[in-house]
Amino acid sequence: MEKIDAHQHFWKFDPIRDSWIGPEMSVIQKDFLPADLAPVLEAAGITGSVVVQSDQSEDENDFQLENARGHDFIKGVVGWVNLQDAAVEEKLAYYKTRPKMKGFRHVLQGEKDRAMMLKPAFKKGISLLKKFGFTYDILIYPDQLGYTRDFAASFPDQPFVIDHIAKPFIKDGKLTDEWKAAIRAVAAHENVFCKLSGMVTEADWKNWKPEDIRPYLDVVVEAFGMKRILYGSDWPVCLVAGSYQQVYGLVKDYFSRYSTAEQEAFFGGNAIQFYNL
């Protein structure tokens, strides 16, 4: 059974473009390329990955598709397109000719308009994805979960996946009833999956322990079930809070009590199905 890391990044570090990587994240203020990740995945027994955009440009798509073309372990690319562009359908038709392009993402968490996903122009772009067989990654903060519920309800046939369990405030230990209810409301839509990724970077980088994160895992696994959750490392961003092995070990230990079939689904099968790898 293939094991898939469904969320990782590559970049050639540019301090202006990548200004989100501030001084406190100096450990990742450098280039991260496929040759850096390949031995890390091999050491963890991971056979493939999905690379996700970290810059909102079509140049980024070209860069990641070229990475994927040159390395068989990169099974798919989640890129970026301007969904509000009048010509977005032509762009989607072009990317359909690139077999490793699997879906798209916009950094909704960074938008001033917290409900941008509900704008008519944005939704029009989303409505075209299914025609071309593309998925959509939803990158949000907890304050946007309510909008996400309505968004997912508008497109019941569109495969969506929430990145990083919607970034709850793990560092503050705020496992609120509000977040739990909001996650469950989104998970009620069966077209929505969830990546168990990016959790250590929402925790206390220097002092997190697995027991800080397990209560959040409990909520997400109960809400989405074992068929709609995906493993993702968020490498190299995760390196600000620990090693790849620690991030992988966190979920490996958590799911060790589950059946072999359930573990195979979480660590690969669900990603293969969702992204059509």
Image (spheres, rainbow, N blue to C red):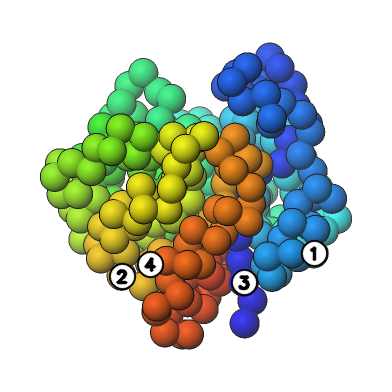
Nearest the eye: 202 or 184: 202
The residue lying at 74 percent from left, 21 percent from top is: 14
Q: Nearer the viewer, mark 1 or mark 3?
A: 3
Please, what is the three-letter code of the amino acid marked with disc 2? Gly
Residue 124's quadrant in the figure?
Answer: top left
Please, what is the three-letter code of the amino acid marked with disc 4? Arg
Please, what is the three-letter code of the amino acid marked with disc 1? Asp
Measure the C-alpha gap from mark 3 to mark 4: 16 Å
Any mark on residue 188, and which? none
Mark earlier in primary sequence (1, 2):
1
* Disc 1 secondary structure class: loop
Q: Residues within 10 Å of mark 1 (few under 14, many from 20)?
A: few
Query: Is residue 29 visible to the viewer in this orientation of the structure?
Result: yes
- The quadrant of the picture occupied by the N terminus is bottom right
Q: Nearer the viewer, mark 1 or mark 2?
A: 2
Residue to which mark 2 is pinned: 225
- The quadrant of the picture occupied by the C terminus is bottom right
Vertical side of 30 occupied by 197: above or below: below
* Disc 4 secondary structure class: loop
Residue 236's quadrant in the figure?
Answer: top right
Residue to which mark 3 is pinned: 3
Measure the C-alpha gap from mark 1 to mark 3: 14 Å
Across and down, in percent, residue 212 comes to 35, 47
Residue to which mark 1 is pinned: 72
Residue to which mark 4 is pinned: 228
Vertical side of 80 occupied by 48: above or below: below
Q: Residues within 10 Å of mark 2 (few under 14, many from 20)?
A: some
Mark earlier in primary sequence (2, 3):
3
Q: Residue furthest bottom?
A: 260
Measure the C-alpha gap from mark 2 to mark 3: 19 Å
* Disc 3 secondary structure class: loop
